[in-house]
Amino acid sequence: MNTSLFELFKIGIGPSSSHTVGPMRAALRFVHELQSSAALPAAMRIQIDLFGSLALTGIGHGTDRAILLGLSGEAPDTVDPARIEDLLAHIRQSQTLCLGGSQEIPFHEPTDLLFHRNQMYPDPNRPSHPNGIRFTAFDAAGAILHSDVFYSVGGGFIVSHAEFEAERDAPAATSSRTVPYPFRSADDLLTIAASQNLSIAELLLANEVALLSDPNIKISRPQPDTEAATHPVNPEDQIRASILALWQVMQQCTERGVATEGILPGGLKVRRRAHRLAERLNTFGSKDPLAPIDWVTVYAMAVNEENAAGGRVVTAPTNGAAGVIPAIAHYYMRFVAKLPNPETSAPALSPQEAESGLLRFFLTAAAIGILYKENASISGAEVGCQGEVGVACSMAAGGLVAALNGTNAQIEHAAEIAMEHNLGMTCDPIGGLVQIPCIERNGMGAVKAINAARMAMHESGDHKLSLDQVIATMYQTGLDMQSRYKETSLAGLALNIIEC
């Protein structure tokens, strides 16, 4: 199965794709299961059990809030962030919950939403994914109407227990998607692209058109704001318009992050820094030859400060790593496409050329992200932050090479270099919050992506390690990593902060 670009890049809310977006989608899906089985009118109580990383860092990651919103019928891509606090306050003050927005039931959070911090998996006898969640609906007599287990497997993706077991027992049998250029590895990607004389971006675009054209595949794709561009006739143009709509959301998120000051929620009293850094660059940046790199840091941190505040972001491929991809897109558009030509003083690229480069960036980054999603993991709870910021860095490096008209081989090399120097990175958020070290880590990952792209484009000939080898190494490293270093806040930086 080849994941879609629009499943890898999803509009949602912060602070976490696996701990906020995923549980919210799981709660909403459970409500839909109750509706489809006609059991919703009989439901009088809901119990939610959280396990593993969801239990250990769920409060700091907003898992409790996300579940209440999802059970109320809200979806992460459509919920109004301005209404969230009022919705949650009503549930908690009234101790009632309106299932799916229609069935009001009593809800006592301390007894109905349980955090099993000493139990890693819903079934201890069959280890699964460390982001497990069980929903159980009861009737008025206390009998079970319906129960289901879901796993939030990273990047906002969720699978039911049955789907997880089917994939584990027979991976090849679970795919029902047909695309013109299916690929399972980077080697496949390069070989197919070479045989068809395609760039990686062109190959993925063709696959996205096939997914769009299949009426049996339901994938949510954002639509542009401008009415004239809402309904392009050509399927390729529809895909391009949806990618640009994602970019628009990323730009809006960056703008909010740069414009906003104050203290982030959660209790650590972390001060937003993107605004202050941007002001300094606007004042003194013209005299600093490294100012473009500082702007990359600003963009990445602005997005992740918005994410930490629970704002609207695009998972890329996760919320914890949501700042890397937009930071590199901003870098390309501002410091490459608009860089003045010394002979003419005109921008280096026309608006049409810049947009084409931006589209190549997103399509190529998505192709690389799909390789990690389908062959390894993008879950911090499963493989540490190498699967989040590390993967985003690898995606951005390869995408930047594509935007700069690099070859497919250079794209693969850049993606490999970027991950090679993120191997072993732990996920140890202080206080279970997506703030320290997560916000700065996005800035570091974005700068590293530029470095990897430049190194790859300056090289010629073969390189010793392939992207496939590095992906396999990353996954094995994650499996070998002690669980306390994988989004549990039980070790590392999470235990080494002075409490004031």
Image (spheres, rainbow, N blue to C red):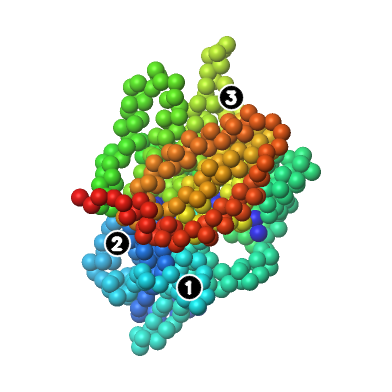
**Residue highlighted by disc 3:** 350
Q: Which mark is residue 3?
A: none
Is residue 315 shown left or right of residue 66?
right
* Depicted 478 relative to depicted 26: above or below: above
State yes or no: discs 1 and 3 in contact (Cβ < 8 Å). Answer: no
Residue at left 38%, top 53%? Answer: 492
* Secondary structure type for disc 3: loop
In this view, the mark in front (1 or 3): 1
**Disc 3 marks which amino acid?**
Ser
Q: Secondary structure at mark 1?
A: strand
**Amino acid type shown at disc 2:** Leu
- In the rendered image, residue 388, in percent from the top left (x then y), is placed at 49, 50
Which residue does the numbered mark 2 point to in the structure image?
88
Mark 1 or 3 closer to N-term? 1
Contact check, label 3 and label 2, Cβ < 8 Å: no
Distance between mark 1 and mark 3 Cα atoms: 51 Å
| Pointer 1 residue | 149
Calculate the distance from the C-alpha at mark 1 to the C-alpha at mark 2: 24 Å
> The residue tagged with tag 2: helix, strand or loop?
helix
Residue 72 figure quarter: bottom left
Q: Quadrant of the N terminus?
A: bottom right
Q: Amino acid at mark 1?
A: Val
For marks 3 and 2, give the CA distance: 47 Å
User: Does 218 appear above or below 117?
Assistant: above
